[in-house]
Amino acid sequence: MEKNGLLNRREIARMVEAYSEMLLRLALNRTQNLAEAEDIVQTVYLRLLRANPTFRSAEHEKSWLLRTAINLCKDYQKSAASRRNVPLEEAEETVLPQETIEVLDAVNRLPEADRYTVYLYYYEHMPIGEIAHILGEREGTVSSRLSRARKKLKTLLKGEGYESL
């Protein structure tokens, strides 16, 4: 592509290299389905090509990609496809330790906004300010959500051997 305001191949390749793993982790965490998560990541990049946004900074670029992925995950969760049964062969491929399953199940029981806040903070190790920017919230709101989510998780996991949270 020409450098006439359109993203060029190098820029797109750099973004794919820099953000694909993070976007896939986010989508997989929300969908619990590798094929759906990969489709979401591909759709993020298709939207990038169609929208052709101008980014003010690397943080803006990252925020745009994450926000797009979050919106696509929300759409997936609302769709009928998210309520279908997973074939046994596919379920066997993703065996996780019991502790991980218990924690993920508890996180998935949190309200949607809290789930994304917890995910971005603990799994992507993002600071509260960056999370606030991505979610379009104030830092105080994100801090409150994180605190509330920790309390809910502590309650949800209490009988599971996580009393020290």
Image (tube, grey):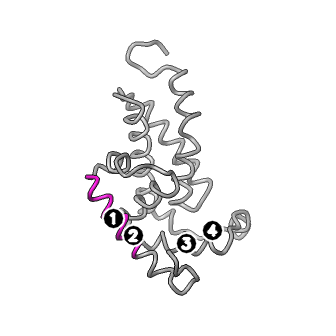
Q: Name the disc covering residue 61, or none.
A: none
The amino acid type of the residue labelled 3 equals: Val
Mark 1 neighbour class, 10 Å CA radius: few under 14, some 14 to 19, many 20 or more: some
Q: Nearer the viewer, residue 108 or 48?
A: 108
Which residue occupies the foreground of this view, 115 or 152?
Answer: 152
Cα separation, mark 2 vs mark 4, equals: 28 Å
Q: Secondary structure at mark 4?
A: loop
- Element marked by disc 3: helix
Q: CA distance from mark 2 to mark 1?
A: 6 Å
The magenta region covers 138-151
Using the image, tell me which numbered label, if any, was put on residue 86. Answer: 4
Q: Residue at x 68, y 67 (%)?
A: 96
Name the residue carrying label 1: 145
Dot 4, crowdedness within 10 Å: few (<14), some or many (≥20)? few
Could you tell me if the residues under marks 3 and 2 are in contact, i.e. CB atoms within 8 Å?
no
Secondary structure at numbered mark 1: helix
The secondary structure making up most of the magenta span is helix
Query: Which tag is nearer the camera, tag 2 or tag 4?
Result: 2
Tell me if residue 149 comes above or below residue 44 in the rendering: below
Residue 46 point in image, percent of width and height: 48, 36
Of residues 85 and 98, the one nearer the viewer is: 98
> Mark 1 or mark 3, which has the lower sequence index?
3
